[in-house]
């Protein structure tokens, strides 16, 4: 079923007394929320290029969660919580398995989502790559919503159950 057909079904069977634009907006927002919550749309994306001694980088709006981070072609960063990052920045923290570059997801003073790198890069111009769960772009016309295959649903379900236990 494509986007237009999906919006038709919602309009015909949903019992909504609103215009078509509102229905299409609702379908898109609901689709994005479901994909974001599932975390199954994952890709490697470019975040930014490094700036010497800059530890904070804006996170693109289409990213739900960063699973892994790499600077340049070889520097992998370990993910830590914001509390662990706080302790590392104050000099009180330790990383399980030793010290190495780490990252955390956080918010800046304006409430925008950011990635924090520790230690701050000492080289400028290296690309920051992230393996991230993404929010899909808006659908329109004859586009078909991307949905996970059955095996992908099982994999995501197993990951969720293991996190909860």
Image (tube, grey):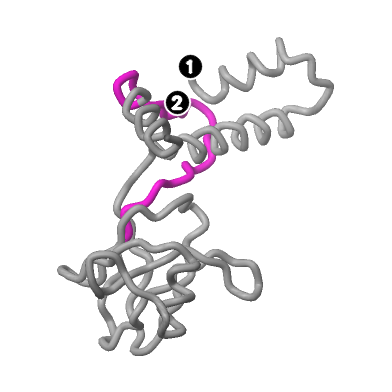
Q: CA distance from mark 2 to mark 1?
A: 6 Å
- Measuring from the top left, give residue 14's x and y in whole percent: 73, 15
Judge from the rendering whether residue 11 lies leftward or rightward of residue 143; answer left or right. right
Could you tell me which residue is drawn at 48 percent across and 26 percent down?
A: 142
Image quadrant containing the C terminus: top left
Q: What is the magenta range?
A: 130-152
Task: Name above or below for residue 99 compared with residue 155.
Answer: below
Could you tell me which residue is drawn at 72 percent across and 27 percent down?
A: 20
The residue to which callout 2 is attached is 144
In magenta segment, residue 142: yes
Residue at the extreme left of the image, as rendered: 74
**Is the magenta region chiefly helix, strand or loop?**
loop
SS at badge 1: loop
> Which numbered disc covers residue 108?
none
SS at badge 2: loop
In magenta segment, residue 116: no
Judge from the rendering whether residue 6 lies leftward or rightward of residue 122; answer left or right. right
- Neighbourhood count class around disc 1 (C-alpha, 10 Å): few under 14, some 14–19, many 20 upward: few
- Measuring from the top left, give residue 133's x and y in whole percent: 40, 46
Judge from the rendering whether residue 15 lies leftward or rightward of residue 158; answer left or right. right
Of the pair 156 and 42, the residue shown nearer to us: 156
Task: Name above or below for residue 119 compared with residue 34.
Answer: below
- The answer to which quarter of the image holds residue 129 is bottom left
- Measuring from the top left, give residue 86's x and y in whole percent: 48, 75
**Do the numbered discs 2 and 1 sit on residues whose CB atoms are within 8 Å?**
yes
- Measuring from the top left, give residue 67's x and y in whole percent: 35, 53
The residue to which callout 1 is attached is 1
Disc with the residue nearer the chain's start (2 vs 1): 1
Judge from the rendering whether residue 99 lies leftward or rightward of residue 14; answer left or right. left
Could you tell me which residue is drawn at 35 percent across and 61 percent down?
A: 79
Of the pair 48 and 69, the residue shown nearer to us: 69
């Amino acid at each position: 079923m494509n986007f237009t057909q999906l919006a038709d079904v919602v309009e015909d069977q949903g019992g909504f007394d609103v215009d078509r634009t509102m229905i299409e907006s609702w379908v898109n927002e609901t689709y994005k929320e479901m994909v974001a919550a599932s975390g199954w749309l994952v890709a490697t994306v470019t975040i930014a290029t490094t700036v010497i001694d800059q530890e904070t980088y804006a996170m693109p709006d289409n990213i739900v969660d960063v699973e892994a981070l790499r600077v340049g072609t070889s520097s992998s960063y370990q993910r830590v919580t914001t509390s662990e990052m706080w302790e590392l920045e104050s000099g009180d923290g330790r990383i399980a398995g030793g010290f190495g570059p780490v990252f955390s997801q956080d918010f800046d003073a304006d409430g925008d989502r950011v990635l924090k790198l520790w230690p701050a890069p000492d080289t400028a111009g290296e690309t920051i790559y992230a393996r991230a769960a993404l929010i899909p772009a808006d659908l329109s016309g004859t586009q078909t919503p991307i949905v996970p295959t059955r095996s992908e649903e099982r994999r995501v379900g197993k990951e969720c159950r293991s996190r909860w236990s």
